[in-house]
Image (cartoon, helix red, strand yellow):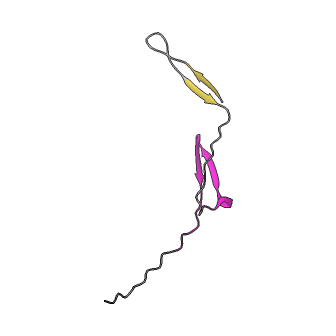
């Protein structure tokens, strides 16, 4: 990535620009559906959507206590 910097005070100014490729890696949780990941770019904002598999519902049951 190339980066340009410029600075300014009363007699000068500062501009910062970045351009080039950008790479970011991260781990997905176990319940992520990796085959269904979608990404969109809108006005320079990258949005990544990672669907998850539904978690199995916990089973609630009554336990009788004698004593």
| Residue 8 colored in magenta in the image | no
Is residue 22 shown above or below 28? above
Q: Is 67 positioned to the left or the right of 41 in the image?
A: left
Where residue 35 appears, as percent x and y from the top left, is 68, 60
The quarter of the picture where residue 21 lies is: top right
Please name the residue shown 58% across and 58% down the image: 29
Q: Quadrant of the C terminus?
A: bottom left
60 and 53: which is toward the camera = 60
Q: Is residue 44 magenta?
A: yes
Q: Residue at x 67, y 32 (%)?
A: 20
Magenta-highlighted residues: 32-56
Number of marks in the rendered image: 0
Quick one: quadrant of the N terminus? Answer: top right
Corner quadrant of residue 28 = bottom right
Residue farthest toward the top in the current orientation of the protein: 11
Q: Residue 59: x and y, percent?
A: 47, 79
| Location of residue 67 with respect to 48 vertically, above or below | below
Which residue appears farthest toward the front when viewing the image?
67
- Residue 34 in the image, given as x and y percentages of width and height: 66, 59
Position of 30 relative to 45 (above/below)? below
Which residue is found at the position 45% from the left and 14% from the top? 9
Coordinates of residue 36 in the picture (x, y in percent):
66, 60
Pick the front one: 7 or 29: 29
């Amino acid at each position: 990535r190339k980066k340009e910097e410029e600075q300014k005070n009363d007699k000068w100014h500062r501009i910062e620009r970045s351009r080039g490729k950008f790479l970011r890696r991260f781990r997905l949780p176990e319940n992520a559906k990796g085959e269904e990941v979608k990404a969109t770019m809108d006005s320079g904002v990258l949005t990544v959507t990672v669907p998850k598999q539904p978690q199995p519902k916990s089973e609630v049951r009554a336990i009788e206590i004698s004593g």
